[in-house]
């Protein structure tokens, strides 16, 4: 019997879109984008995050000023109720994706884990 994994993946995608975690994330994202103040703060926060990640990936040094600016912006984000709720929703969605990834990777972990547990061959 042949299994079409793409059919199952598409089914999982639809289930994710209907999940409470995703619908809450979508609602909070829409709330942030409909509030000009929140949207501006959030976009600035994301730009700073992406800039620092890009520098890290390129092996560039991050300055003290950049770190201070990132911390200042993070504090603004945490204090803004709508953005804070969005970030909590993002965290819940991320945890769901991690749990799903564990389930998806289980066959490979079992396969390679079984190989690791065989010990040295003689």
Image (cartoon, rainbow, N blue to C red):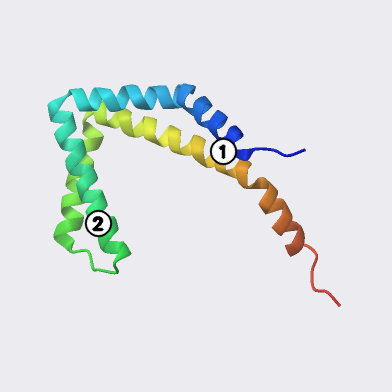
Q: How far across and how far down the image is residue 65, in percent? A: 14, 59
Crowding near the residue tagged with mark 2, few <14, some 14–19, many ≥20 C-alpha atoms within 10 Å? some
Depth check: 50 or 3 in front?
A: 3
Q: Residue placed at 25% from the left, 50% from the top?
A: 49
Judge from the rendering whether residue 23 lies leftward or rightward of residue 16; answer left or right: left
The residue that mark 2 highlights is 52
Mark found first going from the N terminus, 2 or 1 = 2
Judge from the rendering whether residue 5 lies leftward or rightward of residue 48; answer left or right: right
> Looking at the image, can residue 12 be seen?
yes
Q: How far across and how far down the image is residue 13, in percent? A: 50, 31
Q: Quadrant of residue 77?
A: top left
Q: Residue placed at 77% from the left, 38% from the top?
A: 1
Disc 1 element:
helix
- Marking on residue 100: 1
In the rendered picture of this protein, how many numbered marks are placed on residues?
Answer: 2
Q: Residue placed at 33% from the left, 34% from the top?
A: 87
């Amino acid at each position: 019997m042949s299994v079409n994994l793409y059919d199952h993946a598409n089914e999982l995608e639809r289930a994710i879109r209907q999940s409470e975690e995703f619908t809450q994330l979508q609602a909070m994202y829409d709330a942030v984008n409909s509030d000009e103040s929140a949207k501006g703060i959030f976009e600035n926060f994301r730009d700073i995050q992406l800039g620092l990640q890009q520098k890290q990936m390129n092996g560039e040094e991050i300055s003290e000023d950049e770190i201070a600016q990132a911390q200042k912006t993070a504090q603004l984000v945490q204090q803004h109720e709508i953005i804070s709720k969005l970030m909590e929703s993002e965290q819940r969605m991320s945890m769901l994706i991690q749990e799903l990834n564990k389930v998806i990777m289980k066959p490979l972990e079992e396969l390679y884990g079984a190989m690791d547990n065989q010990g040295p061959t003689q």
